[in-house]
Amino acid sequence: LKQDFTPAADGKVTLNSATTLDTEQGNFCQVKGTLAPSIGFEVNLPLTHWSQRYLQLGCGGLCGSLNLNLGNAHTCAPALRGEFVVASTDMGHSGSMMDASWADDPQKRIDFAYRAHHQTARIAKALIHAFYGQQPRYAYFMGCSDGGREALMAAQRFPEDFDGITAGAPAA
């Protein structure tokens, strides 16, 4: 994955690493990167058994880290079998989920409010196309708490990003 993914986003995309990740659900190509100015993202692409589905996960609290935990997908067999491309973003800053020190920066507030998830979806879909030679057939978003707020924001601002959205207990 040496191509430039910047055209897929509204800022410079830097791929920081692409490694093989071995999990109970199977083997993945784990891609980590940054979208300028400071949105971190991770996309895990199944090496076998991809079901042409993409799942983006929301964060809780004030985020600040990459969360690829499928805990809320406990009854979704294809997700648990490692058949989904899964992605997450740190929402534009790093730190503990209750650290708000970044909130003085207007750009970080925009990234947290709505930009990080939309741009992560765009980058992830570009990575999927580069890796598999096709777009996902279905794209989903799942989040709870602040992830639920993120889900509602995605549905309201960028309805074309996802075919299905689960917004659990959205923080207001």
Image (cartoon, grey):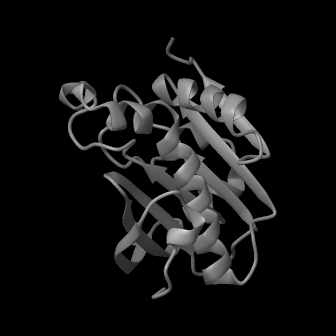
Can residue 109 be seen from the camera position used here? yes
Can residue 82 be seen from the camera position used here? no
The residue closer to the viewer here, 79 or 119, is 119
Q: Residue at x 66, y 66 (%)?
A: 83
* Residue 155 picture quarter: top right
Q: Residue at x 53, y 65 (%)?
A: 25
What percent of the width, then of the height, locates residue 103?
Answer: 27, 26
* Residue 94 picture quarter: top left
Above or below, comparing residue 138 to residue 63 in the picture: below
What percent of the width, then of the height, locates residue 64?
Answer: 29, 40
Question: Does residue 29 appear to the left or right of 151 in the view shown?
Answer: left
What percent of the width, then of the height, locates residue 45?
Answer: 56, 72
Above or below, comparing residue 131 to residue 79 in the picture: below
* Residue 11 picture quarter: bottom left
Q: Across the whole image, how many numbered discs are drawn on residues?
A: 0
Q: Residue furthest top?
A: 172
The residue closer to the viewer here, 156 or 72, is 156
Q: Residue at x 47, y 66 (%)?
A: 24
The residue closer to the viewer here, 106 or 58, is 106
Question: Does residue 70 appear to the left or right of 153 in the view shown?
Answer: left
Q: Residue at x 38, y 67 (%)?
A: 32
What percent of the width, then of the height, locates residue 53?
Answer: 72, 61
Question: Does residue 156 appear to the left or right of 32 in the view shown?
Answer: right
Above or below, comparing residue 9 to residue 132 in the picture: above
Q: Residue furthest bottom?
A: 2
